[in-house]
Image: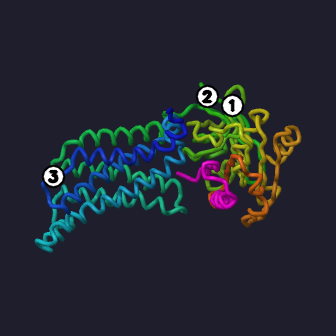
Amino acid sequence: MAISASTLQRWSIPLLAFAVPLGFVVWAFPTGLAPLRAAGIVTGWLGCGLLLVSLLLMLREPRLAFWLGGLERMYRWHHLTGVAAYVLLLLHPLALAANAWPASRLLAWQTLSPVTESWPVWSGWLGLLLLMVGLATTFIPGIRYGVWRWLHALLGLGVVVGLLHLILLGIDEPVLPILAVATAILGWRLLRGDLGLAARPYVVAAARRLTGQAVEIELRPLADPVAVTPGQFVLVAFAHGPVYRGCGEFHPFTISAIDRDGALRLAVKALGDCTRRMLSIEPGVAARVIGGFGGLLGNAGAAPQLWIAGGIGVTPFVALLNDGPLLRPVRLVYLYRREDDATYLSELRAIAASDPRLTLQAIATGNDLPDLDRLLPAASDLSGVECYLCGPAGLVAALQRALGARGVAAQHIHFENFEFR
């Protein structure tokens, strides 16, 4: 029986996270050692394998992201495997010390203390410290992006130092090939992702205010355009203009429309320092674009659909509507704080008036989470319906619970929220 692409995407990362560490353990499994010492070695190799998977999952390559189920999913697993790897690597010296404890408490302490050890052991503790600092940034949501970026880079440095620790201990195989792979992944991310060698050149052709805190930016390609479809997002870095001061860093932006000549229109809401400056962006500003990524309705079938958008999360649905008439009945529930804060509201009303397959339900919610039980369709009306959600993470999580309570199975609830770095 053939395996569908969606099934492969669903299981690709879990299989990687299982197979790579297991392969390392099988390669270097210790024999003839005391159980705790063997456990210490095994946890070290398991952590090493998970770190390599974590590094792979931070690459920003559209084709890789497609096969692994999307960039946002890759980043979630990147954090998960990174934390799991750190815990295993922390257990590595603890198990070795526990092995020495019955013979001598002093020997157990010397196994843990870098003060009494040599450079090979110091390098291991330094690698753990760098990993801890790099991973800690994941749990500090308010940290500035520029600071987060450089601190999180310590994660990659920690991996290299940890592998050098093994080489200093005299373990060349399979460490040297692993070090080569890790260095290649880090170099690939630096050159193609951070420095933008994978990016295509664009220029800002126009900027249109959508609301007081949102703008639509039109980008025209200066060479071959990126391969992108409606519902996807791209990573964009803007340069300086005569007045506008670009951030110079790649950030995710959702596409609101794709023109026939390859021009892209992006919806940007002022949610931070960088996006707030973009409200005053001007034509002529150079931009670099990587993508496309994601695809909220990439695997949509012929079943009726329920789209629920919160705030700027309406953008991928706007792109799908701009792409042409709907092929199936769609109900769009659009939630926004106030009418003057609602992007594309007039365009959506015009499309709903001209396309009988689209039913628009636009609701001003104020600053509080709306009563989802009141605004969602009844359970009987959701039978056989595919549900697509996009918006703030809190709203998406609440919608998942509300739809689940109405009997909608998880495989019929699809969402993206783009809250990753």
Residue 225's label in the rendered image is 2
SS label for mark 1? loop
User: Label 3, label 2: how many angstroms apart (C-alpha)?
Assistant: 55 Å
Between 182 and 407, which is closer to the camera in this rendering?
407
Amino acid type of disc 1?
Ala
Residue 288 as seen in the image, left or right of residue 280: left
Distance in Å between CA atoms under marks 1 and 2: 8 Å
Answer whether labels 1 and 2 touch (C-beta < 8 Å): yes
Which one is earlier in the sequence, the residue at label 1 or at label 2? 2
Give residue 282's position: percent from left, percent from top.
70, 41
Amino acid of disc 2: Pro
Q: Which residues are magenta?
A: 395-421
Instruction: Using the image as rendered, state which of residue 30 and residue 174 is in the foreground.
Output: 30
Query: Could you tell me which secondary element the residue under label 3 belongs to?
Result: loop
Residue 263 circle label: 1
Question: Residue 303: x percent and y percent?
Answer: 71, 41
Seen from this angle, which residue lies furthest bottom? 105
Residue 230 falls in which quadrant of the image? top right
Question: Which tag is nearer the camera, tag 3 or tag 1?
Answer: 3
Q: Is residue 307 visible?
A: yes
Report the front residue among 14 and 187: 14
- Mark 2 residue element: loop
The residue that appears at 20% across and 63% down in the rendered structure is: 36
Q: Quadrant of residue 142?
A: bottom right
Residue at 62% of width from left, 27% of height from top?
222
Q: Amino acid at mark 3?
A: Thr
Label placed on residue 31: 3
Is residue 283 in view? no
Contact check, label 3 and label 1, Cβ < 8 Å? no
Count of labels in the image: 3
